[in-house]
Amino acid sequence: MAFEAVLLRRSSGATALEVPVGLKEYRADGGYEGLEKALSVGPEEVIEEVKASGLRGRGGAGFPAAVKWSFIPKSDNKPKYLVCNADESEPGTFKDRLLIETDPHQLIEGCAICCYAVGAHTCYIYIRGEYVRQAEILETAIRQAYDAGVLGDSVLKSGFKLDMRVHRGAGAYICGEETGMLESLEGRRGQPRVKPPFPAIVGAFGAPTVINNVETLCNVPHIMTRGADWFSEIGTDERNTGPKLYCISGHVERPGVYEFPIGVTLNGLLEAAGGVLGGRPLKAFIPGGASAPILSAEQSHVPMDFDSLAKAGSMLGSAAVVVMDDTTCLVRAVYRLAKFFAHESCGQCTPCREGTNWSQMVLGRIESGNGRPEDPELLLRMTGNMSGTALCALSDACVGPVRSLVQNFRPEIEEHITSGRCPLPYRSVFGKTAGTGH
Amino acid sequence: MSEIKDTRPALPPLPDDVRSAITELRRHYPTEEALLLPALHFAQKHWGGWLPEEAILGVADELNLAPAKVFGVITFYDLFHQSPVGRHRVRVCTNLSCALRGGNEILEAVKKHLNVAENEVSADGRCSVVGFECLGACEQAPMMMVDDDYHPHLTPDSASRILEELD
Ligand SMILES: Cc1cc2nc3c(=O)[nH]c(=O)nc-3n(C[C@H](O)[C@H](O)[C@H](O)COP(=O)(O)O)c2cc1C
Ligand code: SF4
Ligand code: FES
């Protein structure tokens, strides 16, 4: 049976800044019926249904959504919050942007259902500062929802009160990390907090808080209308269920967001996206954003779900697939990523602050022909010290690509070192002029 | 005991548009501090893309926060600027997906076209440019952001043309 797109059903998968789906259109297509259903069955049932669907977080870590919701204390007298993570700064990722641009009410409905399930009366959608137009689209849609009585003092006449706000970030990858985001929301530098306590107990403004990714929440209305069974039958197995958005970019004919049952292989995805750019051979790919270890072409048959990719030594992360053809210098590619992490480290933890900078420095010297014979081992030792030694997962995120370069592509590093130069021919698609990255 | 006198010159009040935008938001947040990022966005917009000292001190005063705290926040975020920028802010993505498709060449072309280095303002005050991290639009690579808009699928020529058309 052919898979029918769910999350992108109202969009063509292309950017649609000018014509997002409006409230009328959304309702005509069955929109907000999931919210109506939720309001009629009650919070406990909503959590049970989402739990039974097996929905796991789409923001990177893959934590079961409803399990997180069930951690929120039931007491009714304290405020609770939902903070929707629309920070989307993981290099290679652009699915949340598309979801917001094309179908903002789908996200608003998902947020509303989640708030109802956990008893939160305030929802902040924390959106990265660069998404100015997208924030405007969301604000317009939220206004429509207020005017139609979908949000406000009595959501769809249920008596449930809900306030929803778009909160803009200001350019910092670390504000995608959930506690960095809370710090930022509260008006501070986005430096992650020590956990525990977890946000479900002490989150935004000291109150119990759910944090979920945009795509995670967009799945929720569909689970309510179509049922947990429908959802859990899609995907690889009972631990990897539902439809999934894959962002594919880099050396590919038709880069974009593609919706598949979770667990499509790179080969399957490439087929939909027109293959490697110019029909060139595939060299390597990143399956899950800049933090994911890089895989070689031989692994293009691995199902891209949480567990299969973990078994293959990488991760699904944000499902940002970056394709690199045979002319790509992987040392340069990973150098660029290390530079990103060095720029984005918030600086609180020594292993992360120093390690990301050292990674960038050592990879830079290898790429420029000044590598030393001991450098591959140095990179392994350094990244070893960066693993599990820091406050948040950014340190490990840098380890992902760097270690995989040494482990999966060591001959390429050694060739750089022994020949004293980059062995790959200059190609304009990945030029010699590295930007400073701001 | 004699009182310690604050000898700093009095601050000019925050402009009305900034102040009223902040006031409008108050009822949506449980703390004053949480208004800081929105307030800085409003102020930066009012002051043409950057935050002069009077803007920073004005916001600190309005929200009852220590100025040092506000400076600390500003320096943390890439989108807040403490020194003058061009009338148009150009951010060229040079992260991996864009780089694979020529993002660095776009940055070079833009710098050459404007005859500036990164973070410099062009002689006519029109533009400042910076190489930027992934802007979340990698399917549009190579791409850049000019003020609040994204420009997809650039070539060095098309990027220069976009800059030509700015006022
Ligand atoms: C450095 C770092 C950056 C992150 N960036 C994002 C992001 O941009 N968007 C996102 O949804 N999650 C991001 N996460 C994951 C969040 O911390 C959190 O796990 C997620 O938002 C939870 O939502 P989910 O359970 O629905 O996936 C990031 C994590 C780390 C460590
Ligand atoms: S691991 Fe890095 S980014 Fe995370 S808190 Fe520590 S220094 Fe900051
Ligand atoms: S790498 Fe350029 S927008 Fe993502």
Image: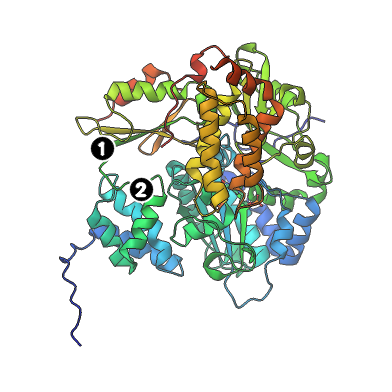
| Residue lying at 64% horizontally and 46% vertically, measured from the top left | A385
Does the rendering let one see residue B7? yes
Where is residue B13? Give x, y as percent.
20, 63
Q: CA distance from mark 1 to mark 2?
A: 15 Å
- Please identify the quadrant where the N terminus of chain A is shown: top right
Residue A15 image position (x, y, % from top left) = 53, 32
**Residue at image coords 30%, 53%:** B43
Q: Decide which of B92, A258 is in the foreground and name it.
A: B92
Give the image quarter of residue A250: top right
**Location of mark 1 (residue):** B87
| Up/down of A297 relative to B43, above or below | above
Q: Residues within 10 Å of mark 2 (few under 14, many from 20)?
A: some
**What residue sits right under mark 2 in the picture?**
B80
- In this picture, residue A394 sits left or right of residue A271: left
Q: Nearer the viewer, residue A50 or A179?
A: A179
Q: Quadrant of residue A120?
A: bottom right
Residue B138 is at least partly visible in this image:
no
Q: Give the residue type that dot 1 points to.
A: Arg
Residue at 71 percent of width and 30 percent of height:
A407
Rendering quarter of residue B60: bottom left
Residue A247 falls left or right of residue A185 = right
Q: Earlier in the sequence, mark 1 or mark 2?
A: 2
| Element under disc 2 | loop
Outermost residue toward the bottom?
B1
